[in-house]
Amino acid sequence: MPQKINIDQVAELARLNLKSGERAKLAADLERILTYVDQLQGINTDHVTPTSHTLALENVFRPDAVVPSKIRDAVLQHAPKSEGAYFKVPKVIGDVS
Amino acid sequence: MKPKPTGAKSAQPFKSMRDIEQVIGLEVHVQLKTESKIFCACPTRFGAEPNQNTCPICLGLPGSLPVLNALALDLAIKTGLALNCEISARIKFDRKNYFYPDLPKAYQISQYDMPVARNGHLTVEVSETGQALREKKIRITRAHLEEDAGKLLHEGIKDASWVDYNRAGVPLLEIVSEPDLRSSQEAFHYLAGLKSILQYLDVSNCNMEEGSIRCDANVSVRPKGDSKLGTKVEIKNMNSFRGVQRALDYEFKRQTGMLERGERIEQETRLWNEAKGETQGMRSKEYAHDYRYFPEPDLVPFSVSQKKISELKASLPELPRARIRRFLTDYGLSEYDAYVLVSDKSLGDYFEACVKEKANPKLASNWIQSELLGELNSRGLALSESKVPAQNLAGLIRLIENGTVSGKIAKEILPLMFETGSAAEMIVKEKGLIQMSDSKLLEELADRVIKAHPKPAHDVKTGKREALGFLVGQMMKETKGKANPKLINEILVRKLSS
Ligand SMILES: [Zn+2]
């Protein structure tokens, strides 16, 4: 059966470190899901409107009004790392080769 | 950022750089002018303390629910209408997934296949000094709403980056053009035209320094006449319209150079380095363009009624193109002058305020473009900070028109108006600058000047008109520039003829 899934790329995009055992199992699971989707693709949906939401609700808005949350200091305290009023993350510069 | 047709893979043979054209499409991110963010009630105000404008929603904390800001959608629809777009009857939001610390949820709420607006166009007015405007229609592919990301700080920080999420969740409208632009100059005028429309709509602050307009470019090259697109390179990180122009020029040279050397152009994203004046390849290209979009389950879909669209359409103000046409017919300005005044809404408003105060339109146009802007520039002031309001400039122009002061003296009065904030009439009175139009006094002075300079006077008499200028100059000197130049000319000519 031709592979639909490049498990290494999927793992890379999801930032997951998979062990070799997991890799094979998850690849098989995802293949099965895609095969099922293929089955669905075969159904004639010419007269069915696409559905992205199942709730019978639309046009839920809020007015453009400011309500200060005042949660910053509490959130910073719960952050894994912070520095002053900033969140601190591993260095991400180095985009330019 | 959206799926686009990918270009040809290999370099094509060509004769010379002149046979190559640049093909440019622009993606412009515009920060919409709302008080609160797009999906939460945090303020959008620029310059707050780091992370002050955050809440569980824009920080992506579990259990929080985004709700769309009604004004953000209205502003997006208005912009779509002004760009001649079709407004979608049904719109929805989607998650664009990627990992980067400026994105607290590890996805950005954006719109994938049901954007607010599509299939529009913007007519770009390409202007060159003193020439008629050249028009070019640039197609707009789509305009969609999305949330901004946070801001990362790296500089001077060891072994870490700092994040400020104040900007995360600020409403953006991404406006995507078709690859219809053919030069960096056209791209510049497209951006200027778009900015001008946004200013007239009052949907954005349009402040480049605060990042309220940002632009990415998709660029390729191909032999002129080819219909197939070359391999597309995306350029990011341009911080000004001039920066965009420079980056496109650089990229055109780089890409044509590669073709000349028979090298293959890679599809990639490059960052513009303003200081070095070059684009640089990005290291992390393996993640590019696999955003795994899917419908945002936390936001319900939206339908936009025809009634709503009509209402918003009716609320649109006069737009720059219509205003340029009106300036031509109502005020008899040249196309170029009308374009310059209209491009900046506040300048156009200032001009019309002058005309309303009975200033001659052509004089007003000239004075605003040369003297007023000159004074503002040399003082480093914006028009809004000018100490010379439109009625004061109109006052000065009226004094020129009715002969109270000469144009030369008026140019000396304007800086004083800037310094004191006084009306022109006041300064003229205080400094005794009223133009001498007393013909008896001027006649006597002319007699004296002719007597003191017999040689030039003789020259004028014998038909050497060039000498007249010298005599006029002498009279201006005697009157400290206050003599009415037209009058002294007449007097001298009369006295020296026959
Ligand atoms: Zn918030």
Image (cartoon, helix red, strand yellow):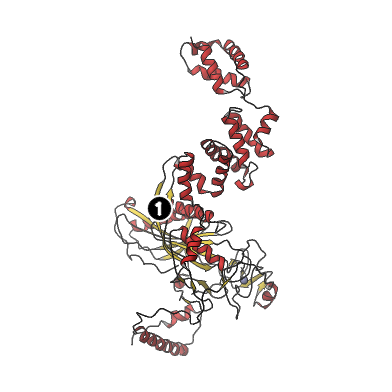
Categorize mark 1 by other alpha carbons within 10 Å: few (<14), some (14-19), many (20+): some
Q: Residue at x 44, y 81 (%)?
A: A8
Percent from the top left, x then y, of residue B88?
Answer: 44, 68
Q: Nearer the viewer, residue B231 or A96?
A: B231
Q: Nearer the viewer, residue A23 or B47?
A: B47
Q: Is residue B254 above or below residue B384?
A: below
Write down the chain letter for disc 1. B
Rendered view: B121 above or below B368: below
Left or right of B225: which side holds B138?
right
Q: Say if B203 sits above or below B161 in the image.
A: above
Q: Is residue B78 visible?
A: no
Q: Quadrant of residue A92?
A: bottom right
Q: Secondary structure at mark 1?
A: loop
Left or right position of B267 against B409: left
Which residue appears at 46% of the width and 55% of the height? B247
Q: Position of residue B314 (x, y in %)?
A: 50, 58
Which quarter holds ligand 1?
bottom right
**Residue A50 location, x and y as percent?**
41, 78
The residue carrying mark 1 is B183
Judge: label 1 CB < 8 Å from ligand 1. no
User: Which quadrant of the view contains residue B449?
Assistant: top right
> Does residue B405 show up?
yes
Name the amino acid, label 1.
Ser
